[in-house]
Structures are given as structure tokens and as C-alpha cells.
Image: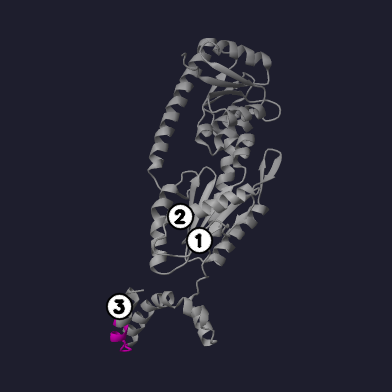
């Protein structure tokens, strides 16, 4: 089987120039042509095999300067690291070349050029692109061992699967509510296909920031798939977690995006679970139920928040009662409404114990024996 030839994009509004360059390069390279910057950007965004771009500066619609800016500002390394060689003529002044260099031009080639010079430049920058891609693959391999998602700066799936069970175990031991929210960007694959990877990943980064801005600093936010996120909220009961999910939904519905002359909006589907805590509960079970509710929202057309159990889900995953704070418990006790406090008394006493120890030590209350008995009793809960 013959090896695939390196793929080069030539961008020039002159059909004669495109044809001439294509003929000179055709023996060693597969040449793709575009007659303006808009067509070139569509090709670059959708064709991952492009290795070098040769572009003219002065073109109708999107010119060479604007195309170069789009390439260098792309969030995708495959695009922003592309070698871009500027085709110049004797009439192009030095100021234009300085501007192109400032925008990130890799090199310049001046018309008229001979075939040897053109092929040498093309071969050199194909080799540069191949080396860059090898480094990117090595970097990705290292990222798999990391706990940070490189695109969004959030935690990744590996981090969630390591620390999720630890946080759930803490919640069970201390009778503290915990909630898991799963989020998927609706029709992200369609956006990526129509607008290209660069636009799609800018949207991804923006949505990750929206999610992070809606949660508490102590919550864990992770990107766990191409367009998938998880938010683990220790100490957040059903009502609190639902409020967070609804806040994300509301902001997403108000946020607009723009690509070229096109304006559009994105939505998310969400699946939320606040499990009833049992000693045997596993984090994978919680994740599975949140995933099931997320998929249900996606099946119903997206832009949905699903937080209720379906009929086939057992009572283990029904939302538990919203946790009371110590202040709320004191207000209820003073008002004589002790029924709700009674159902959460063990958890409240566990949380109160450190304060009692501190107060006894600071104020010399003489409660040492009583606190010792209390500590032993709490251990049995």
C-alpha cells in the first residue's frame, strides 16, 4: 500500500496562481486549493490532514491576515500550530510583512518563485508539522496520567473516580448529604461538524466556566467526556443541588455565541441524584443513576433537568431529606418543632461535638467526663 502523501493547502484568489503552485507541488504532495480565507478556514477546521498552509494576503471576503489570526487564536493545537507560509509579491510593502509576522506567520515566499524553492519550503514545513504532532501525541499520553483536563482546567475523569468514592465514604460516615450532577452539552457533535473543532472547543471552555461559576468552591467539577461534565457536591441536599442545576440551566439559556455572521445558543441536559445513604452504597451506583437520568433528559430532546427516579429505580436512590444546619435545628427546637430535628439528631450531634470540646476547654466548664462518654457514644452511630 502506497504511503499517503503530505497534504498542503494553497489559498489564493488567483486561479492561475493556484494552478501554477499545484503543478509545482503535485509530484511530492497532495494539494488542496481555496480561493479565499472563508473557504480555507472551512477546510482547516474540518480536515485534520492539512499539514502546511500557503496563503496570499490580499483576498476578498476573509483576507490572509484574518485567516492567519483565526489559525493562531484557535484553541485546538492541531490548528494553532500549523505552519503558515505567506505568499508575497514585490508590490507588498514591508509594513504588511511585519503585520503578518506579528500575527504569527511562519515564513514568507515571494512571487515569482522557482519550483526548487517552493518544494524545499513545503518539505521543510511538512517535517516541522510532523514533529509537532508527535510532540502533541506524547503530551496527550502524559495528560492521561494527570488529573487535570488540559482544555478546560477542570478536574478530569481520573480525578473524579479516585476522589468520588472518598467523598461518598465521608458523607456516609458523617451522615452528610451528597449530590451528583451529570451534564451533557446538547448536540455538541453537530456544532463541531458544522462550525469546526476550533469554534466547538471555544464553546466548551465557555460552558465549563459557566458550570464552575455556579457551584461552591468546595464542590468538585470534572470534565469526564468529550462534552460531558460531573459536579460532586458534598453537603448539598436535594433542594440545594437542584438549585445549582437550575442556575446552570438558566444561564445557558441566556448565553449567546457567535461564529462569523452566525449567532446561536447552546443548551445542556442534566441528571441529578441525591442518594439515600447506606453503608453498602458505592460511588459507581450513584454515577450510574445520574447517568441514567441524564440519558433520559437527552432522549426527551435535551435542555432538560431530570432529578426524579424512574419507576424501575429502587428506593436506594430516592432523594433524602434536606440536611438541617445547626442554626436551623436550634430555631426548630425553640419553636417546639422537634420532629424533623429528631430524624437528623445523630448527624447534628456529630457536627456539634467539636464545638462542645472547644467550649469546655476555653471556658473550663467541667464537662470532661460527659464529653468522653459522648465521644464513645458517637463512635457507635
Horizontal arrangement in the rendering, residue 153 relative to residue 357 (left or right): right
The earlier-in-sequence mark between 3 and 1 is 1
Which circle, 2 or 3, is nearer the viewer?
2
**Quarter of the image that includes the C terminus:** bottom left
Horizontal and vertical percent position of residue 140: 42, 37
Q: Disc 3 to disc 1, how far (Cα)? A: 31 Å
Name the residue that disc number 3 marks: 376
Q: Against 197, is 58 above or below?
A: above
Query: Quick check: marks 1 and 2 in contact, CB under 8 Å?
Result: yes
Badge 1 density bin: few <14, some 14–19, many ≥20, Cα 10 Å: many
Badge 2 density bin: few <14, some 14–19, many ≥20, Cα 10 Å: few
Q: Is residue 118 magenta?
A: no
Q: Against 223, is 381 above or below?
A: below
Query: Quick check: marks 3 and 1 in contact, CB under 8 Å?
Result: no
Name the residue that disc number 2 marks: 285
Count of numbered circles on the image: 3
Q: Disc 1 to disc 2, how far (Cα)? A: 9 Å
Say which residue appears at 44% left-offset and 78% top-offset.
345
Query: Quick check: marks 2 and 3 in contact, CB under 8 Å?
Result: no
Horizontal and vertical percent position of residue 116: 50, 11
Viewer-proximal residue, 289 or 105?
289
> Is residue 122 visible from the viewing direction of this image?
yes
Name the residue that disc number 1 marks: 317
Secondary structure found at label 1: helix
Q: Disc 2 to disc 3, how far (Cα)? A: 32 Å
Viewer-proximal residue, 273 or 362?
273
Secondary structure found at label 2: helix
Label number found at residue 113: none
Q: Which residues are magenta?
A: 364-372
Q: Against 213, is 53 above or below?
A: above
Badge 3 density bin: few <14, some 14–19, many ≥20, Cα 10 Å: few
The earlier-in-sequence mark between 2 and 3 is 2
Amino acid at each position: 500500500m502506497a504511503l499517503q502523501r503530505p497534504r498542503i493547502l494553497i489559498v489564493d484568489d488567483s486561479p492561475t496562481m493556484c494552478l501554477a503552485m499545484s503543478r509545482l507541488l503535485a509530484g511530492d504532495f497532495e494539494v488542496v486549493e481555496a480561493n479565499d480565507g472563508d473557504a480555507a478556514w472551512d477546510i482547516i477546521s474540518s480536515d485534520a490532514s492539512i499539514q502546511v498552509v500557503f496563503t496570499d494576503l490580499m483576498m476578498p471576503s476573509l483576507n490572509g491576515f484574518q485567516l492567519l489570526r483565526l489559525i493562531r487564536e484557535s484553541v485546538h493545537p492541531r490548528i494553532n500550530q500549523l505552519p503558515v507560509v505567506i505568499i508575497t509579491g514585490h508590490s507588498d510593502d514591508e509594513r504588511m510583512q511585519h503585520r503578518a509576522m506579528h500575527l504569527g506567520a511562519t515564513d514568507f515566499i515571494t512571487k515569482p518563485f522557482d519550483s526548487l524553492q517552493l518544494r524545499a519550503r513545503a518539505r521543510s514545513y511538512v517535517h516541522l508539522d510532523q514533529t509537532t504532532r508527535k510532540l502533541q501525541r506524547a503530551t496527550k499520553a502524559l495528560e492521561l496520567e494527570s488529573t487535570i483536563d488540559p482544555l478546560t482546567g477542570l478536574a478530569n475523569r481520573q480525578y473524579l473516580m479516585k476522589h468520588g468514592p472518598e467523598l461518598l465514604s465521608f458523607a456516609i460516615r458523617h451522615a452528610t448529604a451528597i449530590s451528583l450532577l451529570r451534564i451533557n452539552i446538547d448536540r455538541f457533535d453537530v456544532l463541531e461538524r458544522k462550525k469546526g473543532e476550533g469554534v466547538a472547543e471555544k464553546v466548551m471552555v465557555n460552558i465549563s466556566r459557566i458550570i464552575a461559576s455556579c457551584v461552591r468552591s468546595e464542590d468538585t467539577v470534572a470534565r469526564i467526556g468529550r462534552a460531558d461534565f460531573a459536579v460532586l457536591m458534598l453537603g448539598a441536599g436535594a433542594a440545594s443541588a437542584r438549585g445549582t442545576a437550575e442556575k446552570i440551566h438558566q444561564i445557558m439559556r441566556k448565553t449567546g455565541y457567535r461564529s462569523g455572521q452566525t449567532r446561536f445558543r447552546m443548551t445542556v441536559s442534566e441528571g441529578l441524584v441525591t442518594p439515600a445513604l447506606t453503608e453498602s452504597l458505592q460511588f459507581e451506583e450513584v454515577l450510574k443513576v445520574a447517568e441514567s437520568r441524564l440519558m433520559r433528559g437527552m432522549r426527551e430532546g435535551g435542555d432538560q433537568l431530570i432529578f426524579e427516579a424512574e419507576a424501575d429505580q429502587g428506593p436506594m436512590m430516592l432523594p433524602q431529606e434536606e440536611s438541617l444546619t445547626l442554626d436551623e435545628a436550634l430555631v426548630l427546637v425553640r419553636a417546639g418543632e422537634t420532629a424533623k430535628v429528631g430524624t437528623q439528631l445523630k448527624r447534628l450531634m456529630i457536627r456539634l461535638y467539636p464545638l462542645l470540646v472547644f467550649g469546655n476547654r476555653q471556658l473550663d466548664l467541667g464537662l470532661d467526663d460527659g464529653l468522653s462518654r459522648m465521644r464513645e457514644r458517637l463512635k457507635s452511630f
